[in-house]
Image: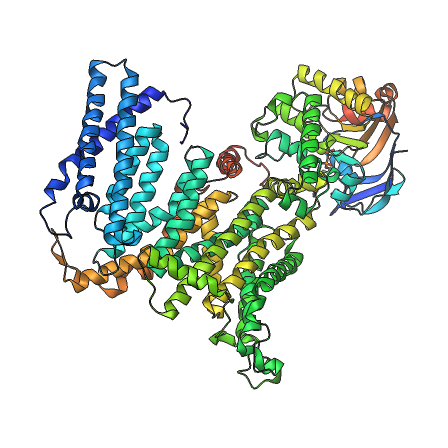
């Protein structure tokens, strides 16, 4: 088991955004979380990545308790993510964004940076080369020196993925990675997620609204509704689950 | 020879322009030929030419000038007749250029013989202008490179202006506040104009290590100004790390300067004796270099101490707390004295509000004094008294020290900016949540920014105390923090070159230009000058309206104007410029999109 969340609870004042959710992920799998808007999916991501601390419950990653660690420590432990509203470092160049993502992989040494000793320069060159590889991987190689903010929407999403991959994570959390994409871009994104798992061996967990994407690539799907996990299983199981049908048909299916 | 720096420009075109410029210049010289001045007394006329006339052999050379002028004219003229004969222009420009340079060289040699010293020669009225113009013409002709030439003209004219104006002159304040800023800004022009690297370095060294010290030896006020500029520049570089790189608004930055200054002050002034029961200072002036290092460390630690409690704060809150911190340090040094009967306050470390007097200067080797004395004599400003030799030597020492330390600060800041550390700072500034989610340890990086920024101010504090040999809490008031902040904002947040330029502009405005306007008004008052046309006797100008009294008003207006027309600063960092544009776009978008979340609110989706 790579990730093991047990009975996680997160409350915001009177609202319980995540209610007693237990959830596990096996290594090298492609997983999805779906659910209507406001179901608590993003909050669940924030609990895993340490941006919020669960009020109750426990989170283990790779056999290690990560609840209560700071976000940067959790990132160092091997969980990286993207954001629902893209959060790039807009004024930095594309490649610099990826380099920031590599922070935990680099030896951060004040005197190295000030003296520019050969070891420091070698590390910078290696980082640069790796960042270029990653950009190649997501298809942004030729935009390495553009300013992140000036990229088209789809490219920004892909850059966020490259940045998240730069820290060599074991688990990659993608929060609505195809939101706002046209069908062709969604298809490309799907193949990218697969390659992340197949080529890089990174376990993927994504929040997704586009059912074509979800059903097309995920091996396991969990459904959240009002902060509770109401179903979990293979795409077929979830599709037939009456709770899921009710949750989706009972309210607006369109949620974005 | 300097290579053509503009590969894109057509060399023939360049040569043609050079030839024309050269022709015009020499034609002008031709009209002022020595025979016009030869009959007048020894102290009139145009320096360069007049010096020549006293020597028969030299007069021969003079004929080169009209010849070259004619060649240049012909070159310019034939552009119309034979537009496709570029070689002719090139030859004309080269001949003219070479003639101009030879002319300058010979005139300088003869001038040296006549007057006995470089300074003497340069102080011959008009000499400077001519040397500059002819050198410029020569270089244009020889290199076809207008950029290099432009810079040389700029440097030459401003240098000779600064040299030529004497304090006794009525219009001294006016000319000096034009020429001296021109000279101090010239290094930035050198850096920002395209030219070969070697030429750039040579010109920088010329201005910084030769011309400015020369000006300074002649009039130590200028040296003082440059030292002040450099001190503020180095501190602004430090503050820029905190504000510009990491995005942490620090309004109490001067406190770190105080830490360095009082560190040296307390240990080498005799005022601390009551605590330690010795009649001597605690540290010997020899320990200066050690203390420079200690100042860096002490200020760095203070930076961390300030950083710890304010890490969770952002924006306005951070600004308020840092402001308070700055005041705490100032009030602390005002109160660590034995003026009170309260036994706890009998600890005299800082001598309170009166300040610490008699702080030691560092001890310099005797050879340095002798060197400065002989250099001063060589450039024609002999230092007659022992005390003036000492004063000038010390000032020169501090000038080069501050330059070195400031240079190191610039290098460190630039290297940090372009390293994982700088990238992490920028990431935190851009989006703190995303940065930590990418593994950037927020606390450590912010503390590092505070410590690095503070350490620059600490070093400058030690130097400042050693130079002034007196420190008092007044030098560390809130307005000083604001002053450095203004430098950073005016220059361009996040941009090292911008901040340096800001230091020059703001410091000169504050310490020279405004004061000079007051001086000018006073000297015009003494002359009973009446403003023509409106017939306003300057005597009636109320002393309350002296420009020097309005420095804060001027800064306020300057800031407002900057914020309206160029919020990213004079020489902005690339990133900042875009942020400013984005901010403008955002407010528009926000107005359009109703109910959009406010930026800075922490809902993470
Ligand atoms: N920081 C917060 N403060 C208060 N309420 C929040 C906060 N973050 C999320 N919520 C609330 O928690 C619920 C779940 O939100 P979220 O996790 O963003 O849903 P989803 O990502 O599934 O659309 C929503 O009702 C939302 O308003
Ligand atoms: Mg969400």
In the rendering, at what x and y percent does residue B524 appear?
19, 60
Q: Look at the image and tell me in which quarter the N terminus of chain A lies.
A: top right
Q: Is residue A221 visible?
A: yes
Side (left or right) of B6 relative to B432: left
Report ligand 1 position as a quadrant.
Answer: top right
Q: Nearer the viewer, residue A253 or A77?
A: A77
> Is residue A128 or residue B489 the one in the foreground?
A128
Residue at the outermost bottom position: B341
Q: Is residue A61 left or right of residue B132?
A: right
Locate residue B50, reporting x and y percent: 17, 45
Q: Is residue B388 above or below residue B424?
A: below
Q: Is residue B245 above or below residue B397?
A: above
Query: The C terminus of chain A is located in which quarter?
Result: top right
Q: In the rendered image, which quarter is residue A46 located in?
A: top right
Look at 69% across and 46% down and name the residue there: A109
Taking the spot 80% from the left edge, 21% from the top edge, the residue there is: A199
- Residue B82 lies in quadrant: top left
Using the rendered image of the protein, determine whether residue B555 is visible from the camera's viewpoint. Answer: no
| Residue located at (25% from left, 30% from top) | B22
Left-right relation of B244 to B190: right
């Amino acid at each position: 088991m790579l990730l093991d969340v047990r009975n996680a609870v997160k409350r915001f004042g009177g609202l319980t955004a995540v209610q007693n959710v237990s959830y596990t992920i096996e290594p090298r799998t492609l997983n999805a979380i779906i659910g209507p808007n406001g179901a608590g999916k993003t909050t669940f991501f924030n609990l895993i990545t340490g941006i919020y601390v669960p009020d109750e419950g426990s989170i283990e990653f790779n056999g290690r308790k990560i609840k209560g660690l700071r976000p940067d420590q959790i990132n160092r432990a091997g969980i990286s993510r993207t954001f629902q509203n893209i959060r790039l470092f807009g004024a930095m160049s594309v490649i610099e964004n990826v380099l920031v993502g590599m922070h935990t992989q680099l030896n951060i040494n004040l005197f190295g940076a000030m003296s520019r000793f050969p070891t420091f320069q070698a590390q910078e060159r290696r980082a640069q080369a790796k960042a270029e590889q990653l950009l190649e991987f997501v298809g942004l190689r030729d935009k390495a020196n553009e300013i992140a903010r000036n990229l088209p929407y789809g490219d920004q999403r892909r850059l966020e993925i490259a940045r998240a991959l730069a820290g060599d994570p074991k688990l990659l959390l993608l929060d609505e990675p195809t939101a706002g994409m046209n069908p062709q871009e969604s298809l490309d994104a799907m193949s990218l997620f697969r390659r992340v798992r197949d080529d890089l061996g990174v376990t993927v967990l994504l929040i997704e609204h586009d059912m074509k994407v979800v059903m097309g690539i995920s091996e396991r799907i969990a459904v959240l509704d009002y902060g509770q996990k109401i179903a979990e299983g293979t795409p077929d199981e979830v599709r037939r689950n009456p709770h899921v049908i009710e949750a989706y048909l009972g309210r607006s299916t369109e949620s974005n | 020879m300097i290579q053509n720096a503009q590969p894109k420009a057509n060399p023939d075109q360049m040569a043609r322009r050079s030839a024309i410029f050269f022709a015009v210049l020499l034609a002008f010289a031709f009209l002022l030929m020595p025979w016009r001045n030869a009959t007048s007394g020894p102290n009139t006329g145009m320096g360069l030419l007049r010096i020549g006339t006293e020597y028969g052999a030299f007069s021969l050379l003079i004929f080169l000038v009209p010849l070259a002028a004619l060649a240049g004219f012909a070159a310019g003229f034939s552009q119309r007749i034979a537009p496709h004969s570029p070689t002719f222009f090139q030859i004309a420009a080269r001949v003219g250029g070479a003639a101009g340079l030879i002319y300058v060289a010979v005139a300088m040699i003869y001038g040296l013989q006549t007057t006995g010293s470089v300074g003497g020669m340069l102080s011959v009225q008009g000499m400077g202008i001519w040397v500059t113009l002819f050198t410029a013409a020569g270089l244009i002709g020889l290199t076809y490179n207008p950029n290099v030439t432009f810079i040389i003209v700029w440097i030459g004219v401003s240098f000779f202006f600064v040299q030529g104006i004497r304090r006794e002159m009525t219009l001294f304040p006016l000319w000096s506040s034009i020429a001296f800023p021109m000279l101090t800004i010239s290094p930035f022009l050198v850096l920002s104009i395209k030219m070969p690297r070697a030429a750039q370095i040579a010109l920088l060294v010329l201005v910084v290590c030769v011309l400015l010290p020369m000006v300074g030896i002649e009039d130590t006020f200028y040296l003082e100004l440059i030292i002040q500029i450099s001190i503020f520049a180095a501190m602004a570089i430090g503050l820029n790390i905190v504000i510009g790189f990491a995005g942490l608004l620090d309004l109490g930055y001067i406190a770190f300067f105080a830490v360095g200054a009082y560190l040296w002050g307390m240990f080498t002034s005799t005022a601390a004796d009551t605590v330690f029961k010795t009649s001597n200072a605690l540290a010997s002036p020899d320990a200066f270099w050690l203390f420079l290092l200690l100042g860096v460390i002490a200020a760095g630690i203070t930076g961390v101490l300030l950083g710890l409690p304010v890490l969770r704060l952002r924006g306005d809150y951070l600004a308020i707390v840092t402001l308070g911190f700055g005041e705490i340090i100032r009030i602390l040094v005002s109160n660590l004295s034995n003026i009170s009967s309260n036994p706890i306050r009998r600890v005299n470390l800082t001598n309170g509000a009166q300040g610490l007097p008699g702080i030691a200067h560092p001890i310099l080797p005797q050879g340095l004094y002798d060197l400065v004395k002989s250099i001063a004599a060589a450039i024609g400003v002999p230092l007659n008294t022992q005390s003036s030799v000492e004063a000038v030597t010390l000032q020169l020492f501090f000038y080069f020290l501050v330059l070195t330390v400031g240079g190191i600060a610039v290098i460190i800041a630039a290297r940090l900016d372009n390293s994982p550390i700088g990238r992490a700072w920028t990431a935190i500034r851009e989006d703190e949540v995303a940065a930590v989610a990418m593994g950037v340890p927020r606390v450590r990086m912010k503390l590092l920014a505070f410590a690095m920024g503070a350490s620059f101010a600490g070093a400058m504090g030690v130097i400042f105390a050693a130079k002034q040999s007196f420190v008092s809490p007044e030098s560390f008031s809130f307005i000083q923090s604001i002053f450095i902040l203004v430098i950073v904002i005016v220059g361009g947040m996040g941009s090292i070159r911008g901040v340096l330029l800001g230091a020059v502009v703001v410091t000169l405005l504050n310490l020279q230009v405004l004061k000079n306007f007051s001086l000018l008004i006073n000297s015009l008052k003494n002359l009973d000058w009446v403003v023509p046309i409106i017939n306003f006797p300057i005597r009636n100008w109320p002393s309350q309206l002296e420009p020097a009294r309005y420095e804060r008003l001027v800064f306020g207006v300057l800031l407002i104007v900057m914020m309206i027309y160029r919020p990213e600063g004079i020489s902005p960092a690339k990133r900042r410029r875009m942020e400013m544009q984005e901010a403008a776009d955002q407010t528009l978008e926000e107005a359009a999109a109703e109910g959009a979340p406010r930026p800075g609110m922490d809902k993470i989706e």
